[in-house]
Image: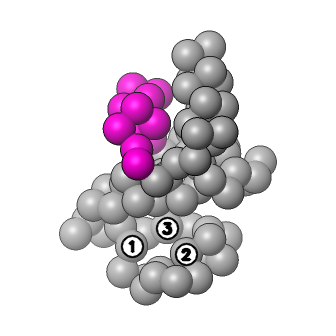
Amino acid sequence: MSEARLPEFLRPYFWDTDFDQLDPVTHERFIAERLMEKTTPETFRWLMEQYSLVRLQEIVLQSRRLSPRDRHFWRLYLAQL
């Protein structure tokens, strides 16, 4: 596990997990999928700063957790960048 921690403003999005044990590197797929489902301006900005465009595209393409609606939105959005 890396030394990186999630910012405190993300805690409410991970109410069902041990937030203090989440690592942005080790748990990147889980974190990205959760925030992609619950996007706000703050979570969106954090996602785009934290993970590379290529990595986010990979997560969207491989995700089984994202709804078809969310997957479609992220595919279209990330394709424009």
Read off the magenta span: 51-64
The residue to which callout 3 is attached is 6
The residue to which callout 2 is attached is 14
The residue to which callout 1 is attached is 22
Q: Looking at the image, do the residues carrying marks 1 and 2 touch, with CB atoms under 8 Å apart?
A: yes
From the viewer's side, name the closer residue of 29 and 67: 67
Earlier along the polypeptide chain: callout 1 or callout 2?
2
Which quadrant would residue 77 be assigned to in this image?
Answer: top right
- Above or below, 58 against 43 in this view is above
Q: What kind of residue is marked 3?
A: Leu
Crowding around mark 1 (Cα neighbors within 10 Å: few <14, some 14 to 19, many 20+) is some
Q: What kind of residue is marked 1?
A: Leu
Q: Residue furthest front?
A: 68
Q: Looking at the image, do the residues carrying marks 3 and 2 touch, with CB atoms under 8 Å apart?
A: yes
Total label count? 3
Secondary structure mostly seen in the magenta stretch: helix
Q: Dot 2 lies on which element?
A: helix
Q: CA distance from mark 1 to mark 2?
A: 9 Å
- Above or below, 29 against 45 in this view is below
Residue drawn at x 46%, y 53% is 65
Which is more foreground, mark 1 or mark 2?
2
Q: CA distance from mark 3 to mark 1?
A: 7 Å
Which quadrant would residue 45 be assigned to in this image?
Answer: top right
Q: Residue furthest top?
A: 80
